Each structure stands twice: as C-alpha cells, then as structure tokens.
Amino acid sequence: MDRQLKSDQRRVLEWIQRNRARRERATAIGRLAEEMGKAATVAHTDLRAAAEALSLLVDDEFREHCRLSSPEHGTLVVCVDQPTRVFAVRARWAECLRRALRKRGGLANFRSLSFEWGDKGMSLPAPLRTDSPAKGR
C-alpha cells in the first residue's frame, strides 16, 4: 500500500513537472528603463540630425508652421500647426524633403515621410549663415 501511494505521488509529480507553465524571468525594471532610455536617446539624436539637415533646405514659413516629430517605424513626421495648411505644406515640400531623405547621410534612418496636423515635436533651427556681414573700420 505504501509503495502504491508513493508510485501514485510520483506519477502526479511527474505530470505536474511536464505540464506546468514555465515561468520566464521578468526583465528587471532597471534594465527595462535603461533600454527605453537608450531607444529614446537614439530617436532624439536621429530627429536632431534630421532637423539640422532639413533646416538648410526649408524657408522661414516652413520653420514657423512645422515641427518634426519623433520617428515611428522609420517615418519622419512633419507636424503642421494648422489643419488647413497640411495640404499646402505637403504639396510644396514633400518631394524636396523625400529627395533629401534619400541623399543626405543624416537622414538615412528614415524610410518615409508623413505630414500631419499637430504641434508636437521639435522645431527646426535657423540655418547657420556662412556669410557674415563685413565689419566696417
């Protein structure tokens, strides 16, 4: 009887071992936060490089009404501040910015371009002027 009980218990334990759900160790919260921080830093760096490269191409009106939003899945998002301007900005700048996406090294991480209404994102810096006015003596 004692042997029968031990045999039944062993079978039950073997069944439990075979069929139990294996727990995968959860990622430590510190490591998860670190990975998210690195991803955000990379995205921000890419966005800053894109803003600097595109600032050389666009005019003051574009800078006034548009911002670059963080890329999602390789898409650079141009946020336009007024919904009525989205079509006009897209019509005027889409092809020029797409060519810049293909040519410029700083924009290599972006595969496509999207125009949306919104005020989120990073504004484009004023381009650095190489010609400075001559100082009179």
Image (tube, rainbow, N blue to C red):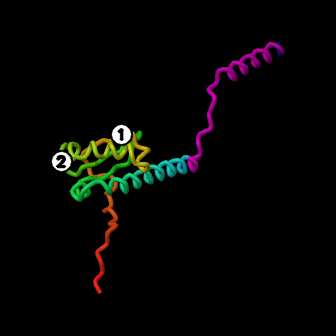
Neighbour class for label 1 at 10 Å: few (<14), some, many (≥20)? Answer: some
Residue at x 55% of width, y 51% of height: 34
**Magenta run includes residue 133:** no
CB atoms of marks 2 and 1 within 8 Å: no
Residue 51, horizontal then vertical, whole percent = 36, 54
Depth check: 3 or 25 in front? 25
In which quadrant will I find the N terminus? Answer: top right
Judge the density around disc 2: few (<14), some (14-19), many (≥20) Cα neighbours within 10 Å: some
Question: Within the magenta stretch, is there residue 12?
Answer: yes
Along the viewing direction, whichever of 14 and 113 lies nearer the viewer: 113
What kind of element bears circle 1?
A: strand
Mark nearest the camera among 2 and 1 is 1
How far apart are the alpha carbons under marks 2 and 1? 20 Å
Q: Which residue is mark 1?
A: 112
Q: Where residue 18 appears, x then y in whole percent?
A: 68, 20
Q: Which residues are the magenta region?
A: 3-31
Q: Amino acid at mark 1?
A: Ser
Label 2: which secondary element:
helix
Does residue 48 appear to the left or right of 17 in the view shown?
A: left
Residue pictured at 76% horizontal, 19% vertical:
10
Quadrant hosting residue 74: top left
Return the residue found at the far left: 84
Percent x, y of residue 92: 21, 46
Q: Is residue 48 left or right of residue 30?
A: left
Comes first in the chain, label 2 or label 1 = 2
Q: Which residue is mark 2?
A: 85
Q: Amino acid at mark 2?
A: Arg
Question: Which is nearer the eye, 69 or 5?
Answer: 69
Residue for point 59% across, 42% down: 27
Side of 62 where 12 appears, left or right: right
